[in-house]
Structures are given as C-alpha cells and as structure tokens.
Image (tube, helix red, strand yellow):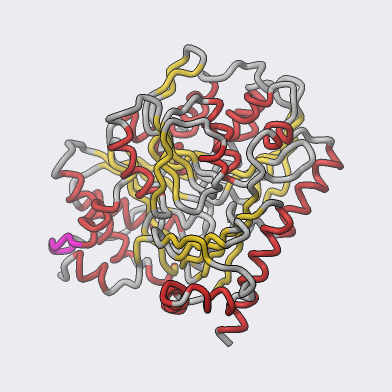
Amino acid sequence: MPSTCLVLAESGVVFGTSGARGLVTHFTPQVCMAFTQAFVGMMQKNFAFNSVAIAIDNRPSSYKMAQACASSLIALGLQPIYFGVVPTPALAFTAMQQNIPAIMVTGSHIPFDRNGLKFYRPDGEITKADELAILADDTELVEADLYDLSTVDDVAATSYIARYLDLFSPTLLTGKRIGIYEHSSAGRDLYAKLFEKLGAEIVSLGRSDQFVPIDTEAVSLQDIEMAQVWQKKYQLDAVFSTDGDGDRPLLSDETGTYLRGDILCLLAAQFLRIEALAIPVSCNSAVEACDSFKLVKRTKIGSPYVIDAFEALLTQFSRVAGFEANGGFLLGSDIDVSGVKLSALPTRDALLPALAVLAMAGNGSISQLVSQLPAIFTASDRLQNFEREQSLQLIEQGVASPKAFLTMLSLGQFDVLSINTTDGLRLTLSNGDVVHLRPSGNAPELRCYAESNSLKSAGLLVDLVLKSVLVFNV
C-alpha cells in the first residue's frame, strides 16, 4: 500500500484558507481515507479518544466522501459518529463538548463540482502547523470497504441552538419579522426554529433542491436584489442567510441591504465587549478607526491564521475574538454576556454575529448602528477560473513596480502611499483608497478588495481593477 503522504501529494487537493479543497474528482475514497488516517494519527499524539464526529453539507458529493472518512475510522479501530447535514460550527461545538476530534465534509461556498474537508481538534479548528503535519504523515495507508452511514441523533443541531437560546432572552426578537433565505445551507432546517424560539415571526425563503454556492464575500447581484424584493414584499426587519456549510452569515438591515461581513462582526464585537481582536488584513479599516478595542492584530487571510493569533492575545486579554471579511466570527475565549457564560468557539460561526447585532439594535434599526461607524466602505469581487500562478505573477509585478502597476490598473493618476504584502498585495493610494489583490486559497480565483469613502466608489474601484486585470491578461 502507498503511504498517506504520497496519496495526498498526488491527489491535487490542497489546504486553502479553511480546510482541504479540490475538485470532487480529486476526492477519491483513497484520498479521503488518507486524509482521515493522517489526521487521526496526528490527533492521537496529543489527545485520547475512541470516536470521531462527522457531518456534511448538502453537496451531492459530500455523503460519499463521508462514507470514505467513516470507513477509514472503522478500519483504524475508531467509532465514527455521523450527524448528517448540520452547520460546521454545530459540529465543531458538539465535538468540543464531547472532547473528540471532528471532520466536516464541505466545500463551503465554492461551486458544487468542488468539495473539501475541514478538521477539528477536541479544542477547536486545526492550525496551519496541524495542516503541515497531516500532509507529512508517512504511514502506510489502511484502505477499507465503504459502509453506509446512519445519523446517530440530532444532538449537534440541538446543542448548537441551545447555545444561543441559553444566551439570549426568548423575547429578543419579539415583534420582528425575519426572512430566512434557506437555499441549500446546511443549517436551513434549524435557523427558523431558533429565531422563532427567540420571538421572531419567520418567513422561509428561497429553499433549493440544487446546491447554491453562496459566497458572503462576493454576494451576487441577483441575491442582493432578491433580498430587497423580499423585504418589500414581506415587510421584513431583516433577512438572514449563510453560505453552504453555515459558518459565514448574511444579515440584511431593515431595507434588505446586506451588511458586509466585517461590519457585521465589528458591531457584534462591540456588543460582546471584546477587548482584543485578530482579523485578516482584508478587513475594513473601520475596525481600528472606531477605537473600540484595546488591540487589533492583523493576520494573513484564513481562519487558521486568526486562530494562531489567539494564543498571544490570550496572554494579555480575557475577552478575545476574531472575524473575517466573510462574516465568520471566531470566539477565542470564554466570556460572560449579561451574566451568562458563553464558551469559546474557535471556528467560524454565522449565528453569533447575526444574533448579537439584532440584540444590539433592539427596537432600533440595524442601519442606524452601521451609520455610527467610521465612514470607510469596502467592496470585493473575484475573477473566476483565474489560475493561482497568474495571480502570483500579477502580484509580483505589483511589488516590483507599484507605480507602473497602478497605471496598468487604470489608476496611474495616484501614487502609492504604502504597500502591505501580508497576504497578496494591498496598496494604499494617495487619495486614501485601498486596493488589495490576492489569489483565493479555495479555488482558482483572483480576489479583489477595495476601500473608499463611499460604497459606490469602493464598488467602482473593484470593477475597474478587475476589468483592467482582464485586459492586461488577454
């Protein structure tokens, strides 16, 4: 039999910003078993356990991948605990409560022809060092026949809901009419139950039998317009949704306008009285400008980098959290909220930031909360089917000749005030605008982020840059 590291090296699957990602055709049973065996071997060096939790999203390919992971566990003498389709943070929270590792089969927001695996230690999401250890595992692969899976119970969903029912008053959302955009989200069967138990009147919207790759960092124009239509049609106070695996939120204000993920999380962090934050370099500069936090640590993009930063922050502060531009909120420490203990959940979570902002708004409006923040606006979009090598070459040119690079981007009238290469290339221009380009860690895409003094100008800046890149690369 080949070694696990050989199988993984030849698989075409790589670790991205959160988890291993690749084409569905690359996630053969052998590859899934190699990942599982390498992960388990690494975990057994530091933790004692007899079982591993597994869950999936609604992608057509996810069940078969889960079969391979579970069959590998059985061959290794471990018990797989299969929770079926549940949100990633629900699986992570339940596994942490049971002090066991977990594997989530999901490609998050990427198209259905791709998929992925996310791995969780008994104390939270794996780190970048853990990823390297998985890839370096050099044991002989143990292969197994595929077993059918039976869902054990709904404890993952119920414990996740209970986390927030215990935290918030059952009258939190009384008088609120909230639309739940269900599409194919892994959490679509539990969100309405939770919001109803918190007092809201619910309107279920947009349920789909086909997988819908919702990207909360690059929400489609169709989804943006649909939320505004729903708001007017049903007189909604907010629209709530998530990406495919339920760890990145979408929350609209009372006009049906979706909040940017980092703005949503910034408000949530204020409500939760967070002292120190770890956030990727792509997040809105309003986080520092609002002067609400004792320390803001900027990291590379990806939840493992945010989690890595927690260790140092926790030596100085007791209320630590992180978030990403996609809206995923990571709670790095146990905190109390109005006298109720909320345990740490160091992985992306969609529910906490959304509920925190709804609680913060109270009888007022979400848009009013946003209007009180510094007037720094962000936009982002992506070029799909843009190979990573192309992106890296582009960024190298920008680092080598920033002024010529601006000219290529049709921004030659400005100078470069500062350059940040923490993750990709982030340029601050002489007019105060920011342009940030980086290759996606999950798919062959070039991401563009921009900051400006209005939402319109930030969006126009993203459009201009991406169109210029396309012309340049023809």
Q: Position of residue 104 (x, y in %)?
A: 40, 48
Q: Residue 421 at x, y = what percent?
A: 40, 62
Magenta stretch holds residue 138? yes
Residue ranking furthest to the top: 339
For the C terminus, the image quarter is bottom right
Q: Quadrant of residue 276?
A: top left
Q: Which residue is at 46% across, 67% downward?
A: 439
Whether residue 293 is situated above or below residue 230 in the rendered picture: above
Q: Nearer the viewer, residue 231 or 398?
A: 398
The segment highlighted magenta reads: 136-141
Task: Confirm whether residue 246 shows in the render.
Answer: no
Placement of the N terminus among the 4 image quadrants: bottom left
Q: Main secondary structure of the magenta part?
A: loop
- Residue 117 colored magenta? no
Q: Nearer the viewer, residue 59 or 223?
A: 223
Residue drawn 27% across and 55% down? 131
Q: Nearer the viewer, residue 61 or 181?
A: 181
Q: Quadrant of residue 6?
A: bottom left
Across and down, in percent, residue 135 comes to: 23, 62
